Amino acid sequence: MDFKEVLEVHGQTQLLALCKTDAEREMLARQLQTVDWSTLAFRPNEDPAKGHIAPITGLRLHEIEENKSRYRQIGIKAVKEGKVAAVLLAGGQGTRLGMDAPKGTYDIGITRPVYIFEQLMDHLKETVACCGGYVPLFIMTSEKNDAQTRAFFAEHDYFGYPEQFVRFFVQEMAPCVDFEGRLLLEAPGRLALSPNGNGGWYASLKRAGADADFPDVEWYNVFGVDNVLQRIADPVFVGATIASGCMSGAKVVCKSRPEEKVGVLCLEDGKPSVIEYYELTEEMANLRDEKGDLCYLYGVILNYLFNAQMLREIASTRIPVHVVKKKIPYLGADGTLIKPEKENGYKFESLILDMVKLAGSCLPFEVVREKEFAPIKNLTGVDSVESARLLLKSNGVQL
Ligand code: UTP
């Protein structure tokens, strides 16, 4: 099929008028070869229906405390033997924080600079000091922030971490469409693209071959960029997950109230699954067990452990696509770039939380919210720079 036929078959002939030169048409034709057309057919709220939802049993704080030294020993051994890697998901756009630069470069300090990346690297170094072995760190970026992220780490001397244990890899991009499903351009011959969500991390890691130098890795601790209090490759968490025989583990906090807006770990048709807060009915959200605890108690904090063998086995399984409304700058019919004030189309993302279900088994591992959960999503208010600063200070971090 030639370029024009491809556009006709997929109902995208509006792009023809926007590409005026051969060079522009060729550039676009090349990009169209990488488009997954089946993904573009999704629309919001077309997520597959949920199965039967039931509460999941997790490892509570007192149980962890009782077995802590055993778990820690197992975890330390795994780290020392090079079996545990860390994966920092830093490909997001951080739109809520309103930054152009990568979110990890944000300075949360008050009297001195304290960068989000630096804070995370400090936590990783704590693990290394405790275990006596280095943890390979894979950092996922996107085309939009890769160069800046690499430069920032180089400029800060990898925050004292040995460079040979750090690898960057770039996640894939997915085209954006308007509400009618028409592809948009961000420049003549160039599709408007956005990062394809954090669920593609393993596929992107493998495609980049970033793990080639670390063949012994058996567990990946995958975490988001914005929780500045989280422990990374925490040996107790690693040990408890290995001891449980589960193929994945999830750090969780107990929900502070039934309506808290956090993804909840539960069972779906007998398999572990994370469901969004709005997918829980009011009745389910308020349901309590005989001890008075919420039945749907465990909020996920984007800190997971995944078994490498399991990941290899599910590598060819398709992760569900989620459709998100977004403001997408686009080329208007007259060829000028329009920056919309309101959402004007959809982006397509896969989410890491869907990997928990694919893993088949998951250990919910409770952590103390005030000690391990300080996400930075916004500048002020809930989950913000302000709230994270207070939490960091109460944990003895000088800002
Ligand atoms: P969020 O869902 O908070 O998205 O990502 P975001 O892009 O960082 O922020 P907003 O929504 O635009 O304000 C959770 C984690 O997943 C990573 C983010 O970097 C963050 O660590 N992520 C998200 C990716 O690595 N790639 C993506 O495509 C999306």
Image (cartoon, rainbow, N blue to C red):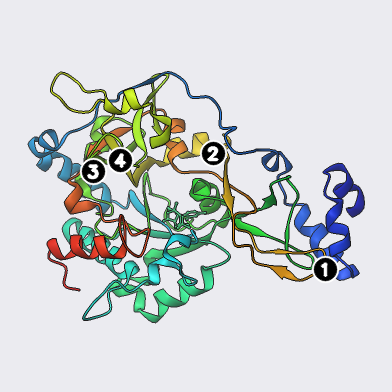
Give the secondary structure at mark 3: helix
Label 1 Cα neighbours within 10 Å, binned few <14 / some 14-19 / many ≥20: few
Return the mark for residue 294: none
Mark 4 CB within 8 Å of ligand 1:
no
Q: In the rendered image, which residue does mark 4 sit on?
A: 260
Amino acid carrying mark 3 in the image: Phe
Between discs 2 and 1, the one toward the N terminus? 2
Earlier sequence position, callout 4 versus callout 3: 3
Q: Residue 100: where, in percent of width, then height?
A: 50, 71
Contact? badges 2 and 3 (CB < 8 Å): no
Disc 1 C-beta below 8 A from ligand 1: no
Residue beneath disc 3: 237
Looking at the picture, how far across and down is residue 335, in whole percent? 80, 69
First-in-chain label (2 vs 3)? 3
Label 4, label 1: how many angstroms apart (C-alpha)?
Answer: 46 Å
Q: CA distance from mark 4 to mark 2?
A: 33 Å
CB under 8 Å between callouts 4 and 1?
Answer: no
354 above or below 268? below
| Residue nearest the observer in this picture, 345 or 32 | 345
Disc 1 is placed on an element classified as: loop
Residue occupying the point 47% across, 72% down:
101
Labels in figure, total: 4
Query: Which residue, given by chain and number where applicable, does mark 2 sit on?
Result: 315
Q: Which one is earlier in the sequence, the residue at label 1 or at label 3?
A: 3
Task: Looking at the image, tell me whether mark 4 or mark 1 is earlier in sequence order.
Answer: 4
- The residue identified by callout 1 is 334
Q: Is residue 303 left or right of residue 318?
A: left
Task: Determine which quarter of the picture holds residue 208.
Answer: bottom right
| Crowd rating for badge 3 (residues with CA inside 10 Å; few <14, some 14–19, many 20+) | many
